[in-house]
Structure formats: C-alpha cells, structure tokens
Amino acid sequence: MRLKATIENVITFSRIVQSIEKQSKACIMRFSPSTLQIICAGESEGGVQVWSGHCQETLFRTDQFIIQSNSNNEITCEVQTEPLLQALRSASASPDITFKLAKRGDVAVFCFDIQVQSRQGKRMEITHDVRVRILRPSEVQALKEPLCPEPDVNIILPPLAKMRTVVERMAKLSSIIGFSASQSGLVKLEIGTEVVGVETVWENCQIPEINDGSYFCKGQDPQQATDENGQQPYFTALVSIRSLLKFLTSYVVSTTTIASICQAHCVILYVFVGEMHEAGAVLTFYIPSRVDEGAE
C-alpha cells in the first residue's frame, strides 16, 4: 500500500477540511487515482452527513500523485479532523508540501513534510504526523450515501455568509428553523415560537436545471415560474438550527451553493468549490428534517 502526493492548493484543502471539521470530529478519506472523497456518515450531531468529491488536480499535482493498493488502487482511511486541519494550516505559507501515508511503529499516519523559511531566510523542514486508521474492506462496502426522494425544488442560495448572519440571530430564539424555497426563486428562513415569529426572504434566486442527473447548469428565469393557479408555493423542511449554522461555516470555501429541498424529509446542499460548471470539488451536505419543536 502506497500513497504519496504533492499538495498544490493547500489553502483550498484547508478550507474544505475546515468545513468538514465543524460537522464531525472524524472523517473518512477515500483516495483513488483520480479523486478524493471526504465523508462524514452518521457520526455528526443532528444526523448530518457529508459526502464530498474532489478531482485530484483540484488539490494535488497530478504528475506527482502516486497511489498503489490491492483494492483497485484505492485507499480508505479514517482520520481525526482537528489534527488534520492543524497540519494543513501550518503549511499554508509553504511552497512545497509533501503528503504521504507512512507508519510509525504499528501506527499508520499521514505524514506532512513542509518546507518553510525562517526569519533569517534559512530553509527549514517541518514534519506533521496525523494518525489514521485504514478501513477494512467490509467497512468500505458498508459506506452508503443517503437515499432521498426526488427534490421538490432546487435553488441557488444567496451568499452563505449573509445567510449565516441571519441564522445566528434566529438561533437566539429557537432551536428549529424552517428552510423553504419556491420554484419562483424565493428562499425563506423562518422560526416560530409561542411568543415570536421571524422570517427572512430572499427574492430572485436562480432556479437551476440538472444536467444528466449530476451537474447543475443555469436554469430558467425565476419570474416565469408559477404553479397552475399563479401562486408561488413554498417547499419546506424543518431542520436543526445548530446543524444549519455548522453547515454555513462552509462559506469559507463556497463560490456557489445549491439547495435541494425534499418536503418534510431533508435539505441537500451542494457547495461548489470554483465555478459551478467547472468545479473540481463539490461538498454535499444532507441535513435531515426534524420534528416541529416550536418552529412553523
């Protein structure tokens, strides 16, 4: 088993892991010759799952990426997100970062060799070891992405940083939030308790189309989308406001985010790293719907 690579875009890699770290203390990384998947399945608070896919060229130098294993040249391992993030952050200013799977005694580690310069201009090498656990084939086979019904609406969200500001204020009043969208380009966040009701609505959001079931492209003019009665119905999922806030920390890496709402079931959020049509990485967040505990 062999894995070695040169990290080319450490800032993007760090921001992706930062988004993952807010969801779970551990994640699964599945390496193949062409892609890297980062998965949080079942261990995060509120039942949120993350399934992200990254082209190798988004993060690594493809001419210096080496992977060998007896499992179709795939390697799947579990790693603690906090020490992984610390290692990447320590490498943020380095022009030369080598990443490899190694062993320290009987312990498997990700070894980061980082080249830096001292204040006197002297070249120095820093090594970070992050412990990992190699998954057994049976554990790899058990990894299954959530099955969800066909979404009732897909919509391009406003900037996540702006949504985060709104949700932080609502979090002081309720633990559950209504996440709604309509085919006419409206996105609504709403809380309701016995003493207060608050809602925020964004208008003229783009309605995307799904191309070949897996890629999103520019869609219809939202002003043209109405139902047969000329109304603008909302599709809603009630979700944990804490889970939504954790997701919204991914604003650090997002360029475009699409929400797919399955009425009363879940919200699926696709965070594109780079331009939507050319994105080399997509983080997919599954936030399950919650029982109404005071929100409407």
Image: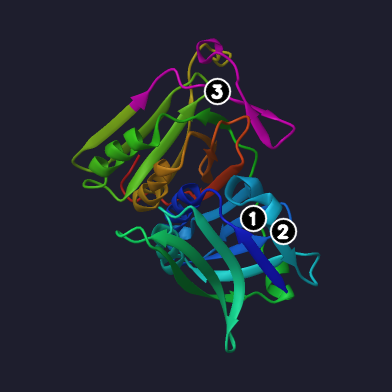
Colour approach in the figure: rainbow
Q: Amino acid at mark 1?
A: Leu
As drawn, the residue found furthest toward the left would be 195
Q: Amino acid at mark 2?
A: Ser
Q: Secondary structure at mark 2?
A: loop
Residue 56 percent across, percent down from the top left: 65, 50
Q: Quadrant of residue 281?
A: top right
Q: Which residue is mark 3?
A: 207
What segment is highlighted magenta in the picture?
Answer: 201-224
Q: Secondary structure at mark 1?
A: strand
Vertical relation: 98 (above or below) 176: below
Q: Which residue is mark 2?
A: 32
Q: Is residue 219 magenta?
A: yes
- Give yes or no for contact between labels 2 and 1 (Cβ–Cβ under 8 Å): yes
Q: Which residue is mark 1?
A: 36
Between the C-alphas of marks 2 and 1, the distance is 6 Å
